[in-house]
Amino acid sequence: MPRTYASAVAILLALCIGACGESEPQTVVIYSGRSESLAGPILERFQAQTGIAVEVRYGNTAQLAVALSEEGIQTEADLFWAQDAGALGAVQEEGLPATLPDSLLDRVPEYFRNGSGTWVATSGRARVLAYSPERTTAETRPASIFDLAQEPYAGRVGWAPANGSFQAHVTALRTIAGDEATQNWLRTMQENGTKNYSNNRTIVQAIADGEIDLGLPNHYYLYRFLSEDPDFPVEQQFFAAGDAGNLINVAGIAMLASSTRQTAALKLIDFLLSEEAQQYFVQETYEYAVIEGIESPAGLPVANQVVPDIDLDALSDLDGTLDMLREGGLL
Amino acid sequence: MTRVLAYLRRPWSWYVLAPILLVGVGVIVPVIYLVLRAFEADANTLGDLVFRTRNLHLFVNTLLLAAGVLALGSAIAFPMAWLTTRTHTRFRRVFTLFGVLPLAIPGYIMAYVLLATTGSYGTLARLFGIEIPRIGGYAGAVLALTLATFPYLFLNLRTALLGLDPALEETARSLGSGTRRVLLRVIAPQLRPAFSAGALLVGLHVLGDFGVVSLMRFETFSYALYLQYAASYDRVYAACLALMLLALTGIALLLEARLLRGLLLHRTGSGPPRRIRRTSLGAWKGPAYLFLLGTATLSVGIPATTVAYWMFRTEPGSLADLAQALWASLSASAPAALLATALALPIAYLGVRSPSRPVRALERVAWFGYATPPLAFALALIFFSLRSIPWAYQTLGLLIVAYGLHFMAEAVGPIRSALYQAPPSMEEAARTLGRSPLRAFLEATFPLLRRGLLVGVAFVFLSAMKELPITFLLSPIGFQTLAVNVWGHTNEALFGAAAPYALTIMLISSLFVGLLLMQSGRPMRS
Amino acid sequence: MRELLSVNDLTKRLPATGPPVVSALTFSVGEGEIFALLGPSGCGKTTSLRLIAGFERPNAGAIRIGGQCMADATTHVPAEKRGVGVVFQDFALFPHLNAAENVGFGLLSLSRAERKRRIEETIRLVGLAGFEERKPHELSGGQQQRVAIARTLAPKPDLILLDEPFSNLDALLRQTTRQEIRDVLKEAGTTTVMVTHDQEEALSFADRVGVMRNGRIEQIGTPEEVYYRPRTLFVAQFLGRTNLLLSDADGMEADTPVGRVALNRKAQGPVLLSLRPEHLTLKEATPGGTCAGSVLARAFKGHDITFTVLLDGSEYLVHTHNGMPFQPGDSVELEPIEPAVVLETSAG
């Protein structure tokens, strides 16, 4: 009997030592609004390089943001990687993200992070004018986004009012041109027969299919179509330099204050801001880098040559924009 | 209430009560959640949001869409069911399969395909030089939703036509009615319960859809609801819209109940099975084949070819990823289908065997779970599970329960029809031969429900395979189903990468449906 | 005869707040006896059967089988524990089992060999040897009926309940099957309660009959008793065609439209009498007689003749032997050959 007892204690001790001595493999849990085709490869590289296991919940950015709000501090997630700044803002309003260390924030220009330092951009997406080269010419294409409300473009333009990028763009217009002018533009655009699409991709597809001739999407969707069909009949350009129609939107990442694996989480953010990751975004997903010294994606002008001078933080008044869109019957 | 209590007091009912309680909780929890969220809004804003004219516009649009889909769906399902059961049309089994297969194609894929096929850059234009205007808006939404949902009508009508007593038809003929008159005056009225069961599924599907309507740019309630979550991360206004949507569902359910009131669902009597009389089509043969082929091409042929075309245009993806996604889909959908059917069984049973008012109410309640927008359903489950059972949150178990509760209503109908074929006296006979109520059910009635149970399992399985919002939010971390992959890739316009996943959904679903048809094709006799 | 089933004051309301479907039902059945509950549809006879079987719980009253209480205010023995067999109107055969498997369904406690023997024995008893492997849909209506009986008999229940057992058979089959089944039941010595709306079936099948109306039993008796001495107007009419005479009684005789007739019991004042057609005969009208009628119709049926006679504006039916010579138009008098039955004014 004493012997059995002793051996039981020994086994227990051994188990305990084993468990205490062996450090748990590090993991980090990320809710990603960026789909696996965009985020997967770069996250895999991170995992391979650091040995930190990345567990991802892929989903729709907005739905994940709402889910995070519902979960509150009980969430499993360490990081939230969103397709647009609006979703990050929504999560921030719930007080969920932690403040990021300056060492990370300082890696990007102020333009690419928010004022309270709770999120940082990982890549930039430009708002552009997409068009059919068959049904428009350089002369007939507008120089300013405000021109699209004019008669020659009646029934030929498409936009995506429900899309976060578009809404951020409207917010930018409000900061640049004022609420009244923006509201006026929204109204005249509608009166001009502008068509509503559910997202950027369908705008580009609709131009190809001849349903519309011009549209206001993000810049990189065209490259996806071109990669499948080099003769895809759509092209895109910026408006005249400095026009409010040119804007860089961001995909960004925030760390949740409730995270218990902050070291690993920060390592991942650090990696996403590394030259390697940034090159990946430019080359593989045709997005703009958020750190200095990396070229623009194929065939596009450097962002700061065309983009109007604007502070991304000013884009946080999403509610005002949503009210405006609702009043206009666009939402 | 007293009658409900009387029910609870019945000594045999724990195994009936347990699932019913689960269903009740599962259905009521989302409603409570939505009400809680809706009341967070201040009264003024809420009033403004609820009573704005845009809602009327959405309401009208939603009704128009439902009406359009039901009309077009009936126009396809009725003749198709009749041709495949009551005429000498050849390849009836093949055409029957084609009448079910569209269920394997997610609605948004159907919409993508229609969009990709038409227009000046459409596949038709590029491959064959046939340029038809890009389909979209109301017409596009009706077409895509009809093609994706008409099988619900078709399957219900087919079962009803097979179970119809040929004597009635023969009587009508002997009274001098021609084929057309027999169809309109004798057969059609008999199909009412089957039609209304199918129509309810289609109607609720249309009410809840946002994948198709958003792609087709047609604004309905659920579209607006989706925009609220998507655009403004607004849980409050979205909850209001969801409640309005549920109210609309309530109206649809009342309508269906009224339609069925006083209708005696006869069951086939004993005696040798009669041979079904088949009509020769004569001069109508050509148009009939054209119709069947056309429908099959449009609803299955074009989507399958288009997706295959996407696939072969791009480099093949990783087979391991595909296998993993397939396993994820199966491991959640298959148990969910079984669970949903198990939950639906007692509800259908009570509804048929003791159709009292509280039981009817309960049966209706089950539909609310189906009609609650999946995103709201998922959020409600997050809300409650984190507060009550945090250890279960985002586990495969909870995902399966969520699927099961959400899709259970789809299984009620087929089981109910099957129960009508199993007279209660059989169970009573088993009781007098020494079986407890549960064993009497299992030994006497259960073997006769095979067909109904299989159809129920299939409906839920096919739906769960395609499900998105619940999967996004409630699945275990890193759990990627086929549907999640399809969505992820198509959303980035990477159709080629999405194609293998979409094709796998279709393939697995068709295998499943094919197996099912083989099973249910065997005649059941009573 | 020892009492096997006793039903006391049985009352059932459906729904629980509605009017009673079965109301204060009281009767008992002796061991080996065949008892029939006879009544029109909706009279509560099937509900009574379901109460006895244990499918429903009574609102009041008690049921005892073999001296053991099966149901009362506090007890409810479930159907499977009552030792009661039921043969259903639709036979309720299990379509997925063959004839032998159906018959063996209730033989749970027997060993394999005993089970096999009992199945064979019962199938032989109902005359279905050779049909063991057939599925129900491969059997004729009469054969299905016998499988149903055999299935019920096989576990040797104390009591068998038959619910309109012959109504699913065609007329010709019904007569022969009925006699055969009666023989089988008698041979097995099983106590039986049958419900039916067919008076001929009840009278020819049962040892005793209880005639039900509106949830109550109006009369219990042997077939002869209830037929020839109905207590109430309802029983008199339900059990067959009869002539009703409104008359003025005085002791053992009464004045009636057909003349002065003898009564089966003492009565006084205005009473309603019942005279079965076969208890009347015809004779030639005596000239100047006050009770003369005329033959309206004559239906020759082989072994007998049914005459319709018009007298004082009322029609009377008379069954006579086939030698009665009258033709339509003949002037006749009606003559009772048995005492008329005085009917009670039944409640309701």
Image (cartoon, rainbow, N blue to C red):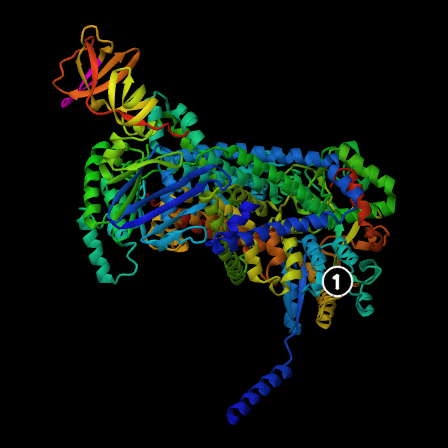
Residues rendered magenta in the picture: C297-306
Dominant SS type (magenta): strand
Looking at this view, is B174 or B78 the one in front?
B174
Give the x, y percent position of residue A178.
88, 43
Task: Give whichever of B48, C86 is nearer the camera.
Answer: C86
Q: Quadrant of the C terminus of chain B?
A: top left
**One can see residue B475 in this view:** yes
- Mark 1 crowd level (few <14, some 14–19, many ≥20, 10 Å Cα): many
Quadrant where the N terminus of chain B sits is: top right
Is residue A234 found inside the magenta-colored segment of the image? no
Quadrant housing residue A12 = bottom right
Label 1 resides on the chain identified as: A
Q: Secondary structure at mark 1?
A: strand
> Does C301 appear in magenta?
yes
Residue at (61% x, 43% y) in the render = B208
Residue B502 shows up from this direction: no
- Type of residue at label 1? Ala
> In the image, B90: left or right of B146?
left
Q: In the rendered image, which residue does mark 1 sit on?
A: A254
- For image coordinates 42% across by 53% down, the residue present is C76
